[in-house]
Image (spheres, rainbow, N blue to C red):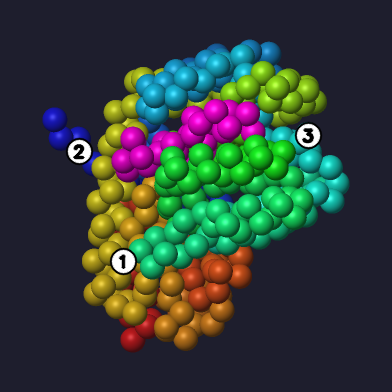
Amino acid sequence: MSIAPLEALPLETLRRRSSTKWRSYPEDVLPMFVAETDFPLATPITTALAEAVAIGDTGYTPPRPGVAEAFAAFAQRRFDWHVDSHRTRWTADVMMGVVEIMRAVTRPGDRVIVTPPVYPPFFATVEEAGAVVEEVPLTDTGIGWELDLVGIEAAFVAGARALLLCNPHNPTGTVHSREALAAVAELAHRHGAVVVSDEIHGPLAYDRAAFVPFLTAGPAAAEVGFAVTSASKAYNLAGLKCAVMVAASDENAEVLRGLAWEVEWRTGLFGALANNAAFAPESDVWLDALLVRLDLNRLLLTELLAEQLPRARYRVPDAGFLAWIDVSDYGWGDDPAVSIRRGARVALHHGPYFGSQGVGHVRLNFGCGPDVLIEAVERIGAFAR
């Protein structure tokens, strides 16, 4: 049975929102930068939050908010991934979980591998944990991006103590293969290193079977790895603070249990309620409809760029609603998002924020209605002419 695509909210409704996406720029700017989407929430989420507000359920997050169990059921259902809820803890957001794990498994001054171009907070998070960033960029194969296993091994040999993995990768939308993840795990195991995998875009893989949770990539991955994720990206819940940290071995589960008690207390009650509702089976139909819409949009973007910006280089992502676009041929400088915002009144994310590999690039959020996507690219096309 075919699934109808999820429809975005009207632009006039979206402009009533008070989030970063809709309050960073004047109303004549189309905001396509930050990773917020333009769709109504899944009904189970709105129901859970409305019921909480109706009874004044706005107190402290309870000791066992149910997030671990809800995520374990979701992971089994969507990814065929068996998660032990007793090896899971929760916190306010994915980057907070990452930094707390990094503090626990590295010492000040240790080197941590990141694979740019990559989500900008990766750099700051490593530094916040007291470690030092070591860049091993993705390899551009000409048809896609891959982890540089030779470079990662060299970094481990030289003493890097951890790898901060983006799986699926932001901003390229790459879904790393099981073979690549298993190889990374073997390298980390051989050199006594740790892998922390940010998997927040996992529910947004277009081929669900292609997404491999790092901890399932093999025995070595279970030994060396931690996963940190949340419903917040797929279900647009960034303002409701909740994420889960998952281990697959007794030793790493003990690391999670050893984190300060307030790491869990930072979780917002509404975040826990919303994540529980998002991970429930009743929300699957919404997620499936979202993926249909995003699939249509990622292909529509290919057509729009061919028409309006034929010198732009864009690869259709394997996951997510973020497009990584090379517009360096248009002469808009190292950070073309600035010129595009000023000249086309479209706000895109700044390529260089993702590392030096982002010079001449922009990141465009296509988690919107097709009408908004068309208008945005047409505006940029007109500016280019």
Q: Alpha-carbon distance for marks 3 and 1?
A: 47 Å
Q: Nearer the viewer, residue 381 or 354?
A: 354
Q: Amino acid at mark 2?
A: Ala
Q: Is residue 353 above or below residue 309?
A: above
Residue span colored magenta: 199-224
Is residue 185 shown left or right of residue 78? Answer: right
What residue does disc 1 label? 375
What residue does disc 2 label? 4
Give the structural element (helix, strand or loop) at label 2.
loop
Dot 2 crowding, Cα within 10 Å, few <14, some 14–19, many 20+:
few
Q: Alpha-carbon distance for marks 2 and 1?
A: 23 Å
Q: Residue at x 58, y 39 (%)?
A: 185
Residue 22 part of the magenta-drawn span: no
Q: Nearer the viewer, mark 3 or mark 1?
A: 3
Residue 376, picture quadrant: bottom left
Picture coordinates of residue 357 (x, y %)?
A: 56, 69
What residue does disc 3 label? 104
Q: Residue at x 26, y 73 (%)?
A: 306
Is residue 283 shown left or right of residue 307? Answer: right
Picture coordinates of residue 52 (x, y %)?
A: 53, 18
Picture coordinates of residue 101 (x, y %)?
A: 72, 35
Q: Nearer the viewer, residue 293 or 156?
A: 156
Q: Nearer the viewer, residue 216 or 321?
A: 216
